[in-house]
Image (tube, rainbow, N blue to C red):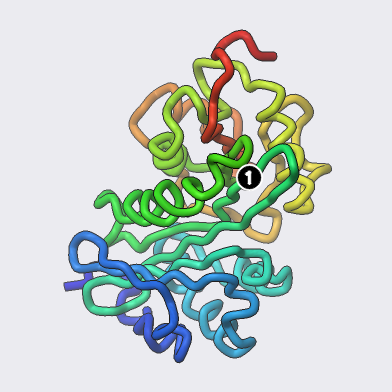
Amino acid sequence: MISDPLAQSRPQAREVLGEAYDCAARSSLARGWHLAAVAAPGTTLSPKQQQDVYSALVPVSSAAFGADMTEYWKDRSANDYFGRLAEFVLIEDSEGRMAGWTGHSLLESPARANVYIDSSGVVPSGQSHGVMREVMARQLTTGVLERLRPQRRVYISARSESPVFYKLMRRLVGASSLFPNPDFRTPADVLECGRELASWLGQAGLIEPGSLVVRNAYAVLDELYGELPSCGEPDLDQMFHNSLGPLDAYLLVGRVVDDQPRGSEQ
């Protein structure tokens, strides 16, 4: 049975995607859940299909974050969220209802590739069960990152104020390769990657110099979380709770290819 309060307002994944559901790359997950991955959703999904997904994301993300996400998705729709994604992943529970989502964009230059995880969440009934970790390991670690790794230096990034999500990212790249880091200074190449990402996000003027902190990153919301999450690791919880306000975020940047010695970088 589905236990989260908004379960019955969550539509069937097949209904959300319409005919695109049968063309999506589908994979089985633990607990009888599934994912459906849509490549280039800005062109693959029709305008109506995109609006249907935006509408479905409101109750799903509101359940995931414990806050009303209506205005968030209005803003993301107005700024062509799907048009900027390389892939959108819809997560469905064992009853076929939409239960989560993630997606990534790809920022490329001759020197590096940055895989940006753009907005992710799963409803309470899927939290603490490794659902998102399994999705990202499959779609990113053994997917796009493996394809990019031989070609150039590769980074993976996200914008977040959650130490729980930080721990998920840390599993993808390793504890010493994710920044900001409570144990190591942030190296110059990571800061540069963060500045490029902030500019791409339209928040170049909000990132603090010499850091990965973005002030007022979620200005469209009253708050992102109903209650700020904690991960149970004091150093990580303090790094987030002591440095970020309710609408602030870190740009999390991880090195996928890391051949430089830790601790000596500026």
Residue 199 relative to residue 152: left or right? right
Q: Amino acid at mark 1?
A: Asn
Instruction: Choose between 176 and 250: the one closer to the eye.
Output: 176
Quadrant, the N terminus: bottom left
Residue 151 relative to residue 225: left or right? right
Residue 232 at what x, y percent from top left? Answer: 33, 31
Residue 257 at what x, y percent from top left? Answer: 54, 31
Residue 255 against residue 49 in the figure, above or below: above
Residue 178 at what x, y percent from top left? Answer: 52, 30
**Mark 1 sits on what residue?**
114
Q: Is residue 4 visible?
A: no
The 10 Å Cα crowd at callout 1, few under 14, some 14 to 19, many 20 or more, is: many
Residue 5 against residue 53 in the figure, above or below: above
Q: Is residue 215 visible?
A: yes
Residue 202 against residue 6 in the figure, above or below: above
Instruction: Choose between 119 and 3: the one closer to the eye.
Output: 119
Residue drawn 62% across the image and 71% down it: 82
Residue drawn 25% across the image and 52% down it: 129
Q: Secondary structure at mark 1?
A: strand
Residue drawn 69% across the image and 60% down it: 220
Snapshot quadrant of residue 193: top right
Residue 22 at what x, y percent from top left? Answer: 39, 85
